[in-house]
Amino acid sequence: MPTLAELKLGQRARVEGIEGADALSQRLMEMGLLEGEKVELIAVAPLGDPLEIRLNDCRLSLRKAEAARVQIAYL
């Protein structure tokens, strides 16, 4: 299944789930990355890490390792 780390600039997707059951997974869910939410990749740092995503009216910056745990479906 594709992950948030694989999105290209400007692409949109729907969150399908988060891998793992640890503190990082819980934190990602607390930030709003819940099943069914729509996200868009809006910026990538010059060296490719971190990624900036739009989630509802918020902007989140995630490391690629964190984004790789978020499973998505392309829109």
Image (spheres, grey):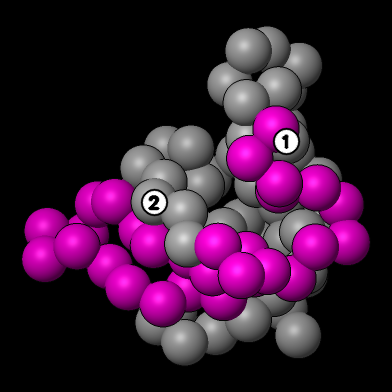
Say the numbered circle drawn on residue 61.
2
Q: Which callout, 2 or 1, points at the residue further toward the start of the chain?
A: 1
Can residue 6 be seen here? no
The residue under label 2 is which amino acid type? Ser
Measure the alpha-carbon separation of dots 2 and 1. Answer: 14 Å
- Residue at 80%, 47% (x, y): give it: 34
Q: Position of residue 17 (x, y in %)?
A: 81, 45
**Residue 40 lies in magenta, yes or no?**
yes
User: Seen in the image, is 47 located left or right of residue 61?
Assistant: left
> Which residues, given as a range, are shown in magenta?
30-58
Q: Position of residue 37 (x, y in %)?
A: 80, 63
Residue 40 figure quarter: bottom right
Q: Considering the numbered disc 2 on the image, is that residue within a helix, a strand or a loop?
A: strand
In the picture of the structure, the residue carrying the numbered disc 1 is: 29
Give the total of numbered labels: 2
Residue 52 figure quarter: bottom left
